[in-house]
Amino acid sequence: MNNLILGILLLYIFTHLVYILHFLVYPNPKIKIVNHLPVTILIAVRNEEKNLTRLLESLNSQNYPKELVEVIIGNDQSEDNSYQILKEYEKIYSWIKIINIEKKIGNLKGKQNVLAHLVPLATHENILITDADIQLPPEWIKTMVSYLQNYDMISAPTIVQGNRLFHQLQGLDWLFSISVIKPFSDWGLPITAVGNNMGFKKSEYMKFGGYEKLPFSLTEDYILFEKMILKDKGKFQWVHLPEVLNISQPIEDLSSFFNQRKRWFEGAKKGPWYAILIFIHHVLIYPTLFLGFLLFSFPFALCLFLMKWIIDFLWLWTACAAIKKTYLLKNFLLFQVYFILITLILPFYFLISRKVIWKGRIYD
């Protein structure tokens, strides 16, 4: 048992050292933009009246010719003033089109159903997808389209940003997890795409008939990635650059936080074998280290914890530096406490119920 504990920790340290070295040796090269290409941006909206102005103003502030941009927004039966806000923006900006989604396609629901309606309406080959609670950096369209020229699908990081400590810890949590996607993508072992920051070629999507030919999934981004990249062997690239770092609104309460993580878990457990191994390893690491206090002396067991925290700090510093967000590390020690709690609590929460409440709807 002693050797197993040490083996799990040493494997954790070794893998994260590999990730760190990969970031340092093989950063994402910036692609020189030769010409601008037409692009369609698709967004699903449900009950987002608090966030829409921020999103739409960040779209309007993009450093990209507006005559080449088409934004199609699907209103998914919003129960607040989202639809009215969207219609006002549609009157102001000719490049925004609002579609009221009232019917389901087959057994599709939520965002997957909205996108199934919107993709066929896209005029252009290059399609980008984001969410209504996102703030886009000014170079987002330009950089994403420049990468998409060479791939069937691309994706990029999103982090949470807010004023409260809980918000900032969520930001570190997101970055800690999604940054692993880059090295595996570069090694030809893609893990997933992020649904609020991704792009794909419309022609590749239409080849298999689109979302209506796929089963319903709470993680619509992963099921599309699975089909286009893992099954159909499409070309994929993860773009880890500050120019494409999207900022998401934080979760405000624990109930919504746990439901978000349960929804993510439904997608993660269907991932490729190497992604599942990474997930299992991360779930086991803290129970393993706590077991060390029963089998080793207290100073030695504490040293094992310190070794993990040191490698975590180096890993987060590398991932943060790549997108110019190193200020997030001021909460690193509190993040470790936060991470211990969610690692120990979430597995039990997942076992209590399969139901997920999201955007005011219940999914079983």
Image: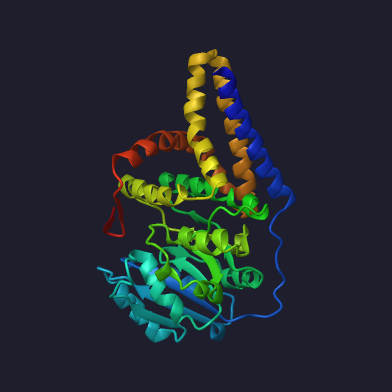
Q: Quadrant of residue 54?
A: bottom left
160 relative position to 243: left or right: left
Q: Which residue is rendered at x = 69% and y = 74% of the image?
A: 33
Q: Residue furthest right?
A: 25
* Image vertical order of residue 10 relative to residue 247, above or below: above
194 over 293 or under it: above or below? below
Q: Position of residue 301 (x, y in %)?
A: 55, 19
Q: Is residue 351 left or right of residue 142?
A: left
Quarter of the image for residue 31 reads bottom right
Quadrant, the N terminus: top right
Q: How many marks?
A: 0
Q: Is residue 281 visible?
A: yes
In this orientation, which residue lies closer to the viewer: 21 or 233?
Answer: 233
Q: Nearer the viewer, residue 128 or 273?
A: 273
Nearer to us in this view, 357 or 226:
226
Regarding residue 155, the answer to whether it shows in the image is no
Instruction: Using the image as rendered, state which of residue 57 and residue 319 is in the foreground.
Output: 319
Residue 139 % position (x, y)? 60, 69
Residue lying farthest top? 297
| Residue 67 horizontal side relative to residue 44, left or right | right
**328 vs 28: above or below:** above
Measured from the top left, where is residue 11 in percent x and y? 62, 32
Residue 314, horizontal then vertical, whole percent: 64, 39
Indicate the colouring scheme: rainbow
96 relative to 9 in the view: left or right: left
